[in-house]
Image (cartoon, rainbow, N blue to C red):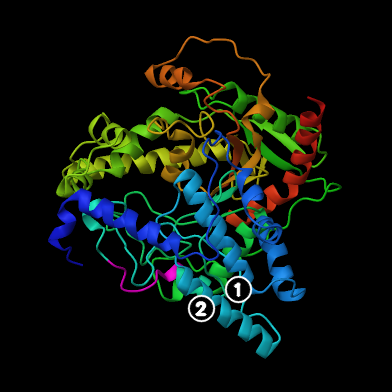
Amino acid sequence: MSTPASSNDWRHAAAAAQKHRDDSIARIQPPLPDLPDDLPLDVTHIPKELLSATENDITTLSVEDLFTATVTQRKYTSVQVIGAYLRRAALAQKLVNCITELIPEQALERAQYLDSYLDQHGHPMGPLHGVPISVKEHIGMRGLSLNAAYCCLYEDRAEDDAEILKILYNAGIRSPAANNGVYGLRPTSCRLPLAGIALENEEEEQISGTVGPMSTSLSGIELFMKVALAAKPWLCDPSLVPLPWKQAKTTAPSSPTKIRIGVFEDDGVVRPHPPITFALNRTVDALRSMDEVEVVEWVPYKHNIAWEIISGLYYPDGGSHEIHAIERSGEPWLPLSNWILKDNPHVHKLDIPGLWSLLKRKTEYCTAHAREWNSTATRFDKSGAPLDAVDVLLCPVGPGAAPPLGCSKYWSYTSQWNLVDYPAVAFPLGSFEDFLGGSEDELVPRNPQDEYNARLYDPQTYAHAPVGLQLVGRRFEDAKLLGILRRLYPHIRKVIGSHQSDQ
């Protein structure tokens, strides 16, 4: 879609976007109360103080409990639910600047329709009836800005809803909300539709893109995937694999077959901060106390090489598309954009043979990584296929908690799985303070990346920050991955919670 000349000035686009966002918040009723003048670093307690008891109850329910309260018990109407989430989302924006816009009129109109539908038919419209959702700005919504986060594209509008939104809409869902310290799934690629999502280089296929859910509960993640794949999106998008969602069966405590979990606390390049390592060790202790679990030491396979490959494949044109989009409006270069595009020694403008060569390295690396995984098998069938190999990997999500703004300069604890296209699910464990007390001995940095990350470590900087870990599975074993986490997580939380209560 062509872009008006007015978007060529980033100041115009930024001012228009901020005004549009603020106007959408001003339409929330009843109006939000004034915020305290002196906000603390941790503002997570403020919604409880400023929202009503009903609003706090609604916005802290899990997906399944919210559905029950709305549809089964009729305790709340969809209009009440949407109103509560709109006010909490608006408050979150005022506290931490986390949203681009609210859509109160559309959300309330939809909620009224859902309430009428439930009254008239006596059953919900779908499995997500009245459940609110926030939508990342890259995901197109009809008539709203679809700009891939570039000022020069701000005035572009989505002509239709993205395919993933159409699926969710038909299941009864729609409204914005936000959170952190939650569950998040990176599915295997080619499972969920990407049509209608704004990407600067959407035609490139060297690193397969994917879209996935975040939720305050693991059951919310599973419900999202079940609903999305029940719609058979592969019938409309031939790039998708026709693989329905099948609820995985996990090993029972009395089963002779154990859940085998490969564990690594350090990828061999950048050491995580002490509380991350402490959280992982506590989690491993919890797993070792489960009869149905076997913990296996995993040696990370050449993560430094993986980063060389994937960071080059992210931008095989040398980043020219991104650079042009930034410079087209004159918007200022931010530190991380400079770091990944201009200071990255692995980003080059590749010719066709150069791209083929890098793709060959990718294929060789993915094959070698699969071979490493297969080597954990305890036996093989008659055809030589591995049996009883490691089921999932447990590892950090990053080398620290959420880094200070502009300092996220080590991605390999997650980009690794983008390269080999493995599903991964992040899960919360507690706050930074819960995992202080582990070894904080100063170690000689291995390399500049390790030294940079070590310099970031300061308990005061990360005070109250959420801490979590991730489980990683093999390609297309997304349901198995979530099933294993569902089996393990209650025990992990119980053991870690008992440690925290003793401190």
Question: Does residue 187 lie above or below 161 as drawn?
Answer: above
Residue 57, position as x, y percentages in the image: 70, 58
Question: Which of the image's four quarters has the N terminus?
Answer: bottom left
Q: Main secondary structure of the magenta part?
A: loop
Residue 427, quarter of the rendered image: top right
Q: Using the image as rendered, state which of residue 165 and residue 152 is in the foreground.
A: 152
The answer to whether 120 appears left or right of 475 in the picture is right
Helix, strand or loop at label 1? It is: helix
Question: Does residue 374 lie above or below 81 as drawn?
Answer: above
How busy is the neighbourhood of tag 2: few (under 14 within 10 Å), some, or many (20 plus)? few
Question: Does residue 11 lie above or below 58 as drawn?
Answer: above
- Residue type beneath disc 2: Glu
Residue 382, position as x, y percentages in the image: 64, 49
Q: Using the image as rendered, state which of residue 107 and residue 431 is in the foreground.
A: 107
Label at residue 109: 2
For the point 66% across and 83% down, which residue is it?
118
Q: What is the residue that sits farthest to the left in this orientation?
A: 5
Question: Which of the image's four quarters has the C terminus?
Answer: top right
Q: How many marks?
A: 2
- Residue type beneath disc 1: Val
Helix, strand or loop at label 2? It is: helix
Q: What is the residue that sits farthest to the bottom in this orientation?
A: 120
Question: Does residue 292 lie above or below 120 as drawn?
Answer: above
For the point 51% across and 78% down, which residue is it?
109
Does residue 445 belong to the magenta stretch? no
The answer to whether 81 appears left or right of 335 in the picture is right
Q: Which residue is mark 1?
A: 79
Residues shaded magenta: 157-164
Q: CA distance from mark 1 to mark 2?
A: 9 Å
